[in-house]
Amino acid sequence: MHISLEVLLDSLIRNRIEALYSDLLKNNSIYNQFSSDRNLYFKQLHELLPQDMHKTLFLYDDADLSVHTILEREIYLQGFKDALQLHNELNILNITST
């Protein structure tokens, strides 16, 4: 059975993204400000929407989070693939130049 690169790297990517978020929370005031703003806007929307729309707001927030999670993972994975490709190309250039 052939296991794809994505499957092999899945937990590595997940752990690395979690570590990056942790670093952002500790060290990036701009990220923290946008995160606080987002939470405030969500709370305001929740308070202003009629009760029958609360579930829709939570579903929207969940879908938005899911989209961002997939995007983050794909970007990180593509960066890893790009690094491997660059490494291979540099090795080929190094081999042909010697």
Image (tube, grey):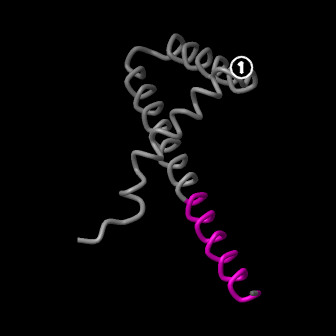
Q: Residues within 10 Å of mark 1 (few under 14, many from 20)?
A: few
- Magenta stretch: helix, strand or loop mostly: helix
Q: Is residue 65 magenta?
A: no
Residue 81 falls left or right of residue 58: right
Q: Is residue 89 magenta?
A: yes
Camera-side residue of 97 and 58: 97
* Residue 78 x/y as whole percent: 56, 60
Q: Secondary structure at mark 1?
A: helix
Quadrant showing the C terminus: bottom right
Magenta region, residue range: 78-97
Q: What's under tag 1, amino acid-wise?
A: Gln
Which residue appears at 49% of the width and 42% of the height? 69
- In the displayed structure, 86 sits above or below 45; it is below
- Where is mark 1, residue-wise? 33
Q: Quadrant of residue 24?
A: top right
Residue 11 falls left or right of residue 79: left
Which residue appears at 45% of the width and 42% of the height? 14
- In the displayed structure, 39 sits above or below 91; it is above
Which residue appears at 52% of the width and 40% of the height? 16
Q: Residue furthest left?
A: 1
Q: Residue furthest top?
A: 47
* Residue 84 x/y as whole percent: 58, 66
* Residue 72 x/y as whole percent: 55, 46
